[in-house]
Image (tube, grey):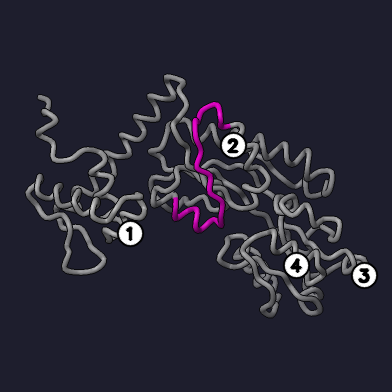
Amino acid sequence: MSLHPDQLAFDLKTLTVFLAVAEHGSMTTAAENLSMSQSGVTKIIRRLEDDLGVSLLERSERPFRPTQAGQELLDQARALLSQAERLQTSVRELGDAPLPVVRIGLVDSFAATAGPGLVRSMRSYASNFTVWSGISPNLGDDLVSRKLDFIISTDPMSSLGGIEYHTVMREPFLLVMPERMAAAIQEPRLEDLARNHPFVRYSERSLIGAKIERHLQQAGISIPESLEFDGTESVFAMVSAGLGWAITTPLCLIHGFGHLPSLRAMPLPGRSLSRTLYLVARESRSATLPARIASDARSIAQKLVDDKIRPIAPWAADEIVVG
């Protein structure tokens, strides 16, 4: 037995709006994330409650939380929207039609180096792109909140349900110093650098910064607070200007290529350290697209290793694993 459309109290758009309100606990925040007016969101929720004949949100406290009926709708809506999203993508893939839009977030160092090549490769299966760059924690939040469909990040987010990830590459950390400092220090030791020269940090708000700080702490190296930045460009500008030394990666080395004449890259002294980049997606987004994007990302990464990294740091290129 099939229902007539007029018998349904909601459509997929209505469920999407309800999901946003329930997850954010706020009509205003949901409206901002959906690029809608607050009054429009409020009307949709009120109409949904009227049509179902039940209250879906506890409005007596902030943030809003679902009622028992609202929680049931929330749980089922997530599954239904995921199925609808997968169905839409699968039909387009089977028909070999480009997706209308692919929303992807790239960690800064990948965006600035591999981003153009990846977008060029993806043109065959996407008509339009939304490409964001940033630090991994922010990109992860945007993936979970459905602002993005895919991210390339250093966090596989494997502890969350409904997430799939594909390894893109693993790269070592390395040391960068101003050329003048490097010429005076033949065999640098992190302990000596920490004691005698300023350290230019990646902010601990970023996963790269947090990873470096843990590495230093485990090695028993304490470095006073000094210069701290979220992005590679600023880190390299400071080192290039002779204001300190830094720990970074080969991808970041390409990102800061314009500063290379005035600095020197070398292997990281002491215990080795590396990071891994992943293509991360919500499992419901597509059956095949995450693996396809990951494959494209690996191809671009390998080309960067061969064409950009090996000529300037062959020892680092030898340690990079793509795939």
Residue located at (20% from left, 69% from top): 61
Q: Residue at x 56, y 37 (%)?
A: 294
Q: Is residue 124 above or below residue 272?
A: above
Q: Which amino acid does label 2 sit on?
A: Val
For label 4, the residue is: 238
Judging by the rendered image, the residue that carries numbered circle 3 is 184
C-alpha span from label 2 to label 4: 30 Å
Category of crowding for the residue at label 1, using alpha-carbon neighbours closer than 10 angstroms: few (below 14), some (14–19), many (at least 20): some
Residue interval drawn in magenta = 122-142
The part of the image, by quadrant, that contains residue 272 is bottom right
According to the image, label 1 marks what residue? 29
Whole-percent x, y for residue 113 in the image: 68, 45
Quickly name the residue at label 2: 119
Question: How far across and down, in percent of the image, does residue 185 sit?
Answer: 90, 69
Q: In which quarter of the image is residue 179?
A: bottom right
Task: Name the side, left or right, on which 180 lies relative to 55.
Answer: right
